[in-house]
Image (tube, rainbow, N blue to C red):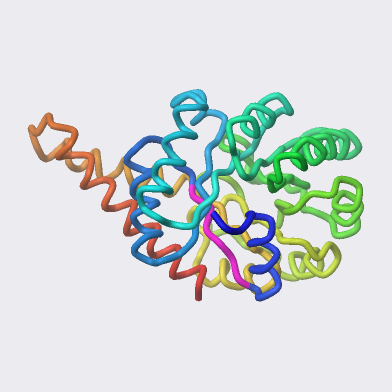
Amino acid sequence: MDMKLQNELIELHQHKRAILAANFYNLETLYGIMQAAKEENNPIILQLSESSLKYMRLEMAAKMAYQAIADFDVEAWVHLDHGANIDLVQKCLDTGFQSVMIDASEKPFDENIKITAEVVKRAQSYGANVEAELGYVAKLNQSQGKTGFTQPKEAKQFVDATGINALAVAVGTAHGFYKEEPKIEIDLLDEINHTVNIPLVLHGCSGVPDLSLQQAIARGVTKINLATEIKNTFMKQLKHELNNSDEIDLRIVFPKATACVVELIRKKIKTING
């Protein structure tokens, strides 16, 4: 891997372009993501959440990702998604993650700064990219009706005080699926972008219209996160196969669900690339 992720993000940000960051949950979803990136000849970020690390075990999941990157010969980086505490971030850094997210966004502003600055300090010796979040982006099972948009002045204060490489912003998206079409606050996003001038990250992109994603990219969003839609695509096809066949060989059934993940990721990459 020739380029550090933070340098890749800076270059993309300067050219108003973005990269897809896709969560994987097992071997099949990992291979689906990497196959799509290979076919599109496009770099990609492989993301692992805390729950996925518990499910697959940290070292096993990391080794799977590194091996897939080598096997598919795709430029890619492994990223911790929504790291809840410094201990988990440290374990991921020690395991070779090239990028980590510390999410202390639900804590008071000053505490978020303190925790995030400590992560930035620790990540420096590893040469790792650090992402943090400011504002309220509803997580799974949290209310999507609550608002807490990222404010430009606070964003600048936060970025200056922590030294992060990328900022995840709250501008109208939420994790999981939407009950109605999400509305991204484009003007707010534009103001944040001009105020902080670092790569911005958009979480909760499952179900966000293609045009909205492209408008966000034109206003500083450099990393597009995709998770729920990947799980849903895989499981819907798997359920269809199981309900319409007596086949018990998972080596025959699973690849059909993986193929749907390939198709989804290819479409997202094309959307992001405009």
Picture coordinates of residue 95 (x, y %)? 58, 31
Q: Residue at x 38, y 66 (%)?
A: 40
Q: How many marks?
A: 0
For the N terminus, give its image quadrant: bottom right
Quick check: 170 left or right of 64?
A: right
Q: Depth check: give the residue in front, 172 or 238.
A: 238
In the image, residue 39 sits, relative to residue 155, either above or below, namely below
- Image x and y of residue 250, in percent: 18, 33
Q: Quadrant of residue 251?
A: top left
Vertical position of residue 212 compared to residue 227: above or below:
below
**Residue 19 on the magenta segment:** yes
Is most of the magenta stretch helix, strand or loop? strand
Q: Residue furthest left?
A: 246
| Residue drawn at (70%, 51%) of the image | 168
* Residue 58 painted magenta: no
Residue nearest the observer in this picture, 25 or 39? 39
Q: Position of residue 82 (x, y in %)?
A: 64, 38
Residue 57 is situated, as x and y percent measured from the top left of the image, at 48, 24
- In the depicted view, which residue is nearer to us: 265 or 212? 265
Quadrant location of residue 4? bottom right
Which contiguous range is marked in magenta?
A: 17-22
| Residue at 41% from the left image edge and 41% from the top image edge | 67
In the rendered image, the residue lying farthest to the front is: 2
Q: Is residue 179 visible?
A: no
Left or right relative to 224: residue 123: right
Q: Could you tell me if residue 248 is visible in this image? A: yes
